[in-house]
Amino acid sequence: MEETYNYIEAYFTQTLSESERKVFEQRCIDDEAFANDVAFYAASRQAIRQQLLQQKQEQWAETTSAEQIQHIKPVSRSLVRRMMPYAAAACVILFVAVYFITQNSSPGSLARGFADKNFSHINNVLGPSDTMQQAVEVFNNKDYAAAKKMFELLQKKYPGDADEKKYLGLSYLFTQDYDKALHEFDSLAKMQLQSNPGNFLKAITLMERGSRSDLEQAKQLLQQEADSNTEWSGQAKDWLKKM
């Protein structure tokens, strides 16, 4: 914990290099636990500031005579001057921490986190060929660029296979090729399946891409999922409350 504290303090005291600062900022976005540590650091600094202010208020309240006030004024001004850098730093840290935590709860980060947790691994499937199994293995190793090429070849050979559309779409999603991902998920959504994740995956893709029109369309798709009592209805309802 001390090492993390020193790392956070180094960022706000500007002792990190430019490249190290970029790594720090990206970590705040990607690592929720680290963002919480930053928030805790900020809250601690703010608490110190509040305690000092409270002490000064108590001193002022106890001062009744003009002579005592004149005696205290030089001390209080000196203390305020000494504490100003710390108070300013606490405010800056609090602002940045709130920003990072807000970023971690944005539609894009919610979608990325859910996709990473629930769609980044494919369970063993019985595909139309051994190539399908190889593509799944490559995908599970998170080599999404290579998996994408393999699923593209498979789709040309077996254009009506729902699993291939889903996995190809996910490969596009994880390589941030959002237009192609949406095309595959839209095609998947039109297929007659007992459980069809197409629209839900479209919503995830739109949330991650994140334009205003994307988020409006994502809300519509999530509302459809919430109203249809599908496997993803609960998650859709939860996201709708946060968007």
Image (tube, rainbow, N blue to C red):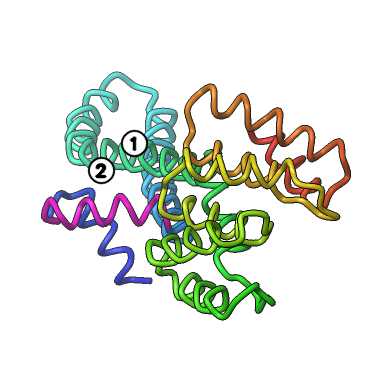
Mark identifier at residue 86: 2
Left or right of 198: which side holds 93?
left
Type of the residue with mark 1: Cys
| In the foreground, 95 or 190 | 190
Dot 1 falls on a residue whose secondary structure is helix
Q: Amino acid at mark 2?
A: Tyr
Look at 47% across and 27% down and name the residue there: 211
Residue visible at 52% across and 45% down in the picture: 181
Kindly identify which residue carries mark 1.
Answer: 91
Residue drawn where x is 81% and y is 54% of the image: 195
Q: Is residue 167 magenta?
A: no
Magenta highlight range: 16-30
Q: Quadrant of the C terminus?
A: top right
Give residue 49's position: percent from left, percent from top: 36, 41
Whole-percent x, y for residue 133 in the image: 57, 78
* Image side of residue 17 versus residue 68, left or right: left
Closer mark to the observer between disc 1 and disc 2: 1
Q: Nearer the viewer, residue 227 or 105?
A: 227
Q: Measured along the vertical axis of the image, is residue 235 above or below residue 92? A: below
Quick one: SS at disc 2? Answer: helix
